[in-house]
Image (tube, helix red, strand yellow):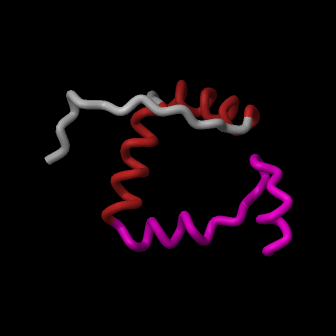
């Protein structure tokens, strides 16, 4: 079982538009960014289908990544 008292502080850079959209949705759904990150990391580590979905995601609407756009 995961010990919830020990935490690692980290910093990630998120595109502004993505974060703004998340804030609106998170208020409606009552979920925090920390909840999303923790659950996503857990699923990424334990669910091969989720991991594959993440790796196969090429939607660059928010990131504007020219590299990922060129792979499509």
**Residue 51 painted magenta:** yes
What x and y, as percent, mark residue 58? 70, 65
Q: Quadrant of the C terminus?
A: bottom right
- Residue at 50% from the left image edge and 72% from the top image edge: 52
Instruction: Report x, y in % for residue 11.
Output: 54, 32
- Tell me which residue sits at (35%, 67%) in the image: 47
Asked if 69 appears above or below 4 in the picture, the reply is below
Q: Which residue is drawn at 46% across and 67% down?
A: 51
User: Vertically, is 42 above or below 51?
Assistant: above
Residue 66 placement (x, y as % from top left):
85, 60
Horizontal side of 5 relative to 52 (left or right) equals: left
Q: Quadrant of residue 21?
A: top right
Up-down: is 17 above or below 67? above
> Picture quarter containing residue 24?
top right
User: Which stretch did the figure color magenta?
Assistant: 47-72
Q: Which of 11 and 21 is in front in this view?
A: 11
Residue nearest the observer in this picture, 36 or 29:
36
- Tell me: 64 left or right of 47: right
Magenta segment includes 40 = no
């Amino acid at each position: 079982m995961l010990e919830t008292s020990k935490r690692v502080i980290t910093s990630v850079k998120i595109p502004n538009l993505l974060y703004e959209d998340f804030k609106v949705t998170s208020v409606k759904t009552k979920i925090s960014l920390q909840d999303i990150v923790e659950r996503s990391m857990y699923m990424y580590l334990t669910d091969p289908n989720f991991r594959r979905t993440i790796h196969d995601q090429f939607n660059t609407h928010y990131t504007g990544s020219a590299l990922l756009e060129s792979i499509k």
